[in-house]
Image (cartoon, coloured by chain):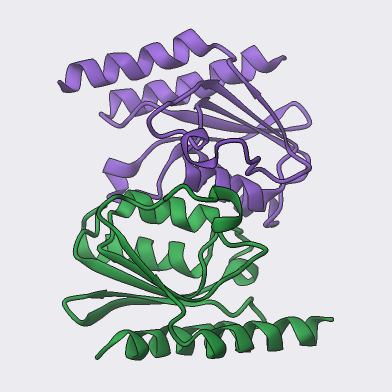
Chain colours: A purple, B green
Amino acid sequence: MDDNYYMQQALLEAKKAFDKDEVPIGAVIVINKKIITRAHNMTEQLNDSTAHAEILALTSAYNFLGSKYLPGADLYVTIEPCLMCVGAMYWSKLQRVIWGADDEKNGFKRITGNNFPFHSKTKITSGILKSECIQLMQAFFKQKR
Amino acid sequence: MDDNYYMQQALLEAKKAFDKDEVPIGAVIVINKKIITRAHNMTEQLNDSTAHAEILALTSAYNFLGSKYLPGADLYVTIEPCLMCVGAMYWSKLQRVIWGADDEKNGFKRITGNNFPFHSKTKITSGILKSECIQLMQAFFKQKR
């Protein structure tokens, strides 16, 4: 059970979003090697632009644990989070955030530049299964054109 | 019905949060001079660190209107929004965002610096009923010490 395994699980969520005609982004949250929540983007279905995979995964985790902090948790997401999602991750005090492919248009880095927007206790990793993550997005937007 | 009036309404929400021992921040969303949603911070009550006044107000507005965008809407909030809330506002394509007092510790500006994180169609105003907004926060944190 390594980063590739958990990202593969996040990709399965992203594929569920794809099949529902949602922007295909998926996320899982892991504590002690166990996946406690799985979520995918549902902004169209819920008519709610806050319903990104990461926000839904965080809210599920808070409900599941009865806590508004997730200090021992790792969040895997297929695409670089947006500013909203990074802000939400800041409050959750995650142990790690791991994403697949960068998102030059909507990713947080375009806005935060060199400032580190995560909690000081959070470590970040990117590029895990990058090709698979980006290919799903490209396939989605190609069919939309 | 001007900015002061709507900020006063957001302050009434902030006072509800104060009375529930929540960080006292309130928000209202206005379309065509009519308040369509009112919300206050509920992170303790919901055990959910995404439950900021602004996120709850946005989600209510999406549900109320059946739309995931709010192009003709103005969001009033008593305190400078955090990164999560600003990111959520970006996606909502609000007409205006108006806040009372700046928040040097948790406000978005500390992270975004000179980059403008709102949607290009969104106009921002700050400093409305600034003293009342900050006094409520100070009273809250004073009693916590």
Q: Position of residue A49 (x, y in %)?
A: 34, 48
Q: Position of residue A79 (x, y in %)?
A: 48, 26
Outermost residue on the top side: it is A131
Q: Residue at x 45, y 62 (%)?
A: B55
Q: Quadrant of residue B64?
A: bottom left
Q: Measuring 46% from the left and 16% from the top, which residue is drawn there?
A: A133
A60 vs A102, nearest the viewer? A102
Q: Which quadrant of the figure contains the C terminus of chain A?
A: top left
Q: In percent of the image, x 33 and y 91: which residue is there?
A: B5
Q: Is residue B21 above or below residue B79?
A: below
Q: Residue B136 appears in which quarter of the rendering? A: bottom right
Q: Is residue A130 above or below residue B87?
A: above
Residue B129, above or below B84: below
- Image quarter of the N terminus of chain A: top right
Determine the residue positioned at 45% across, 66% down: B54
- Percent coordinates x, y for residue A82 in the rendering: 47, 39
> Percent from the top left, x then y, of residue B34?
21, 82
Outermost right residue: B145
Q: How many marks?
A: 0
Q: Nearer the viewer, residue B8 or B12?
A: B8
